[in-house]
Image (cartoon, helix red, strand yellow):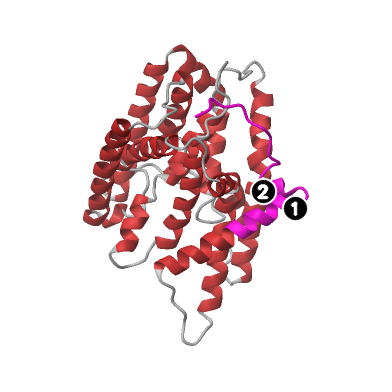
Amino acid sequence: MEKKWYPQMDGLRAAAAAAVVMIHVSAGRAGDIAPVCNVLSRFAVPLFIMLSAFGHGGEDQDISAPLKLFGRQMKRILPPFVLWSALYLVVEAIFGKPHARPLWDLVSGGAYIHLYFIIVLIQLEILYVPLYRAVRRAPNLTLAASAVITLAMQVLICGDWLALWSLPALPIPYTRTFVPYLLFYVAGLWMRRRDKLPVRGSLTGLAAAALVCAGSGALAIWVAGRFPALNSLSLRPELTVYVFGAWMTLWELCSFAKTLPRPVRALSRLSFALYLSHPLIMRLWNEWTIRQDPVIYLRLWQSYLMTFIGGLLIAFLLSRLPHGELLGGAAKQTKRKNNGG
């Protein structure tokens, strides 16, 4: 019987949710630790994409009705995306910074800094069936082709940001297209196809993954410092290596525990709503504090705790509200079959 659920996924999803908050809290901060925390947290969005593909890439998928399959996925992510986008547009207008093209930003992921992820995921879900079939028929070739496409696109984007060349203009930025994220989605399908990920922790595997993670992470920190224009760009080749190192390191760590702690599992359940809601806490705080005399400045850890806890409270409330799923609230829990890992 195919494994229906890997408990390690809860650990990875919780880690990605915690990291994405750090990305936004530490962005633009000066000092020694904030830029490092920002770079090392940038595995979050690619990890969410990998987990999405891994989660519904099992052998039991019925791909004979692709529209029905796509509709089922969109039912979960489209209503929260539209409603939260509208909310952020209203908040910006209230605070005197209305968008020039609100309707376009509503549908293109430009309503706020983090909503591009949903647009990327929608594009990849549109391609789910052909990618699923390709991974089933020629898994290694599909993975290699996606790696070439993704890394080539990332190099082109990096060159554009460094003003080495100029890419043709698109209706949306290249960072909101699926191409530079393709490898992460295909890798999620590929790993689910192989179904050979470790279910028990291995010190040797952990050491190897941690070495790759540490080396690529150090390189990413150096690149961000050496090329300031790339500091806010997550789509870089060395960061792509870091994402896979982080995936395997976290997977090995989670595999040592027979059962993940309850708070980790709870954070995993609330991760989508936390992702959607935490920038609202930051936005409200920033708007309030600039009206104080003197302006109140928080340390990095203070800002992180405020944003994380505030977003988590919103996510918890949405999970309790009737129809809270429309705003990204966690669905009611059901028993999952797993491999005992």
Q: How crowded is mark 2: few (under 14 residues within 10 Å), some or many (20 or more)?
A: many
Task: Give the residue drawn at x 62%, y 59%.
Answer: 313
Q: Which amino acid does label 2 sit on?
A: Gly
Task: Give the residue drawn at x 37%, y 35%.
Answer: 248
Residue 104 in percent (x, y) is at 59, 50
Whether residue 170 is situated above or below residue 130 in the rendered picture: below
Q: Can residue 100 be seen in this view?
A: no
Q: If you read the primary sequence from the N terminus, does the residue marked by circle 2 or circle 1 appear first?
A: 1
| Residue found farthest to the front | 258
Query: Marks 2 and 1: CB-CB under 8 Å?
Result: yes
Is 330 part of what is drawn in magenta?
yes
Residue 268 in percent (x, y) is at 56, 44
Choose top left, top right, bottom left or bottom right for residue 58: top right
Q: How far apart are marks 2 and 1 (CA)?
A: 8 Å
Q: Residues within 10 Å of mark 1 (few under 14, many from 20)?
A: few
Q: Which of 25 and 203 is in front in this view?
A: 203
| Residue found farthest to the right | 322
Task: Give the residue drawn at x 69%, y 37%.
Answer: 75
Q: What residue type is labelled 1?
A: Leu
**Which residue lies under the disc numbered 2?**
329
Whether residue 42 is situated above or below residue 317 in the rendered picture: above
Read off the magenta span. 312-341
Quadrant for the N terminus in the image: top right
Q: Nearer the viewer, residue 3 or 63?
A: 3
**Which residue lies under the disc numbered 1?**
321
